[in-house]
C-alpha cells in the first residue's frame, strides 16, 4: 500500500504542479522524480497533497515535556461520526513523520480512495465478533445435537442387532427341535 500511496501522491503533485512547485526549493521535476524512489521520506508538501487527494485532514503531534499538538488542517472538532478521519502523524527530530494509530479503532486505511466514506467504526468490529461467537455457539450446539443423535442411532442399532441375534438363536433352537425357545434354554441352564 505504501508504494501505491507514494505513486498516487507524486502523480497528484505533477498534475497540480502550479499549486505545489512554489513550496519546493529544487527543480520540481527532479524533486518529483526523487520522491518517487522507495526510501525517500515525504515532507509537508507530500502531506498536503495526500490530505487533498484523500479528502482527509491532517493532525501532527510532536513529543515534548507536555503533549504538544503542532498542526491540524481543519478547525472543527472531530466527532465519533466524523466522515473523514484525520491522518494522524507524529513528528520526530524536525525531519521525520510516523503514523499514529489507535490499535483498537478500525481507522487504518479508511479514506484511501474513498473520501467521504462512512464506516460504522468500532461497532462493525464488535458486531462481527459477536456474530462470529454466536455462530460458533450455534455450531457447537448443532454438533452436540448431531452427536447425541449419532449416539442414539448407534444405541438403537445395537439394540436391533441384539434383538435380531436373539431371535435368530431362538429360531435355530426351534428348528432343531431340541427346545421350544430361548427362554426355556436359559431356564434349563439355571437349573430351574
Image (cartoon, rainbow, N blue to C red):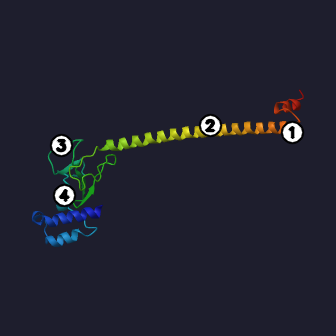
Q: Which mark is residue 176?
A: 1
User: Residue at left 88%, top 32%?
Assistant: 189
Instruction: Point out the tag, 4 or 3, that comes first from the N-terminus.
Output: 4
Badge nearest the viewer, 2 or 4 = 2
Question: Could you say where residue 118 lies in the image, as x and y percent from the top left?
Answer: 24, 46
Q: Which mark is residue 152?
A: 2
Badge nearest the viewer, 2 or 1 = 1
The answer to whether marks 1 and 3 mark residues whose Cβ atoms lie closer than 8 Å is no
Q: Which residue is mark 3?
A: 77
Which quadrant is the N terminus positioned in?
bottom left
User: Disc 2 and disc 4: Cα gap in Å?
Assistant: 65 Å
Instruction: Point out the tag, 4 or 1, that comes first from the N-terminus.
Output: 4
Instruction: Point out the tag, 2 or 3, that comes first from the N-terminus.
Output: 3
Instruction: Point out the tag, 2 or 4, that comes first from the N-terminus.
Output: 4
> Vertical placement of 60 versus 25: above or below?
above
Q: Secondary structure at mark 1?
A: helix
Q: Is residue 186 left or right of residue 128?
A: right
User: Disc 4 and disc 3: Cα gap in Å?
Assistant: 21 Å
Q: Nearer the viewer, residue 74 or 170?
A: 170
User: Residue at left 16%, top 67%?
Assistant: 14
Q: Which residue is mark 4?
A: 53
Q: Secondary structure at mark 4?
A: helix
Badge nearest the viewer, 2 or 3 = 2
User: Disc 1 and disc 3: Cα gap in Å?
Assistant: 99 Å
Amino acid at each position: 500500500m505504501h508504494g501505491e500511496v507514494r505513486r498516487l501522491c507524486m502523480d497528484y503533485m505533477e498534475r497540480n504542479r502550479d499549486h505545489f512547485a512554489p513550496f519546493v526549493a529544487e527543480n520540481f521535476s527532479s524533486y518529483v522524480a526523487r520522491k518517487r524512489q522507495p526510501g525517500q521520506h515525504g515532507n509537508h508538501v507530500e502531506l498536503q497533497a495526500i490530505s487533498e487527494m484523500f479528502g482527509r485532514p491532517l493532525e501532527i503531534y510532536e513529543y515534548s515535556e507536555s503533549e504538544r499538538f503542532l498542526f491540524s488542517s481543519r478547525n472543527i472538532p472531530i466527532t465519533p461520526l466524523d466522515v473523514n478521519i484525520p491522518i494522524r502523524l507524529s513528528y520526530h527530530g524536525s525531519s521525520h513523520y510516523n503514523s499514529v494509530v489507535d490499535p483498537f479503532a478500525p481507522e487504518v486505511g479508511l479514506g484511501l480512495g474513498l473520501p467521504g466514506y462512512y464506516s460504522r467504526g468500532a461497532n462493525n468490529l464488535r458486531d462481527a465478533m459477536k456474530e462470529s461467537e454466536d455462530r460458533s455457539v450455534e455450531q457447537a450446539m448443532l454438533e452436540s445435537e448431531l452427536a447425541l443423535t449419532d449416539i442414539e442411532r448407534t444405541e438403537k442399532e445395537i439394540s436391533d442387532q441384539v434383538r435380531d441375534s436373539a431371535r435368530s438363536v431362538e429360531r435355530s433352537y426351534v428348528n432343531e427341535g431340541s427346545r421350544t425357545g430361548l427362554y426355556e434354554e436359559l431356564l434349563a441352564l439355571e437349573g430351574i
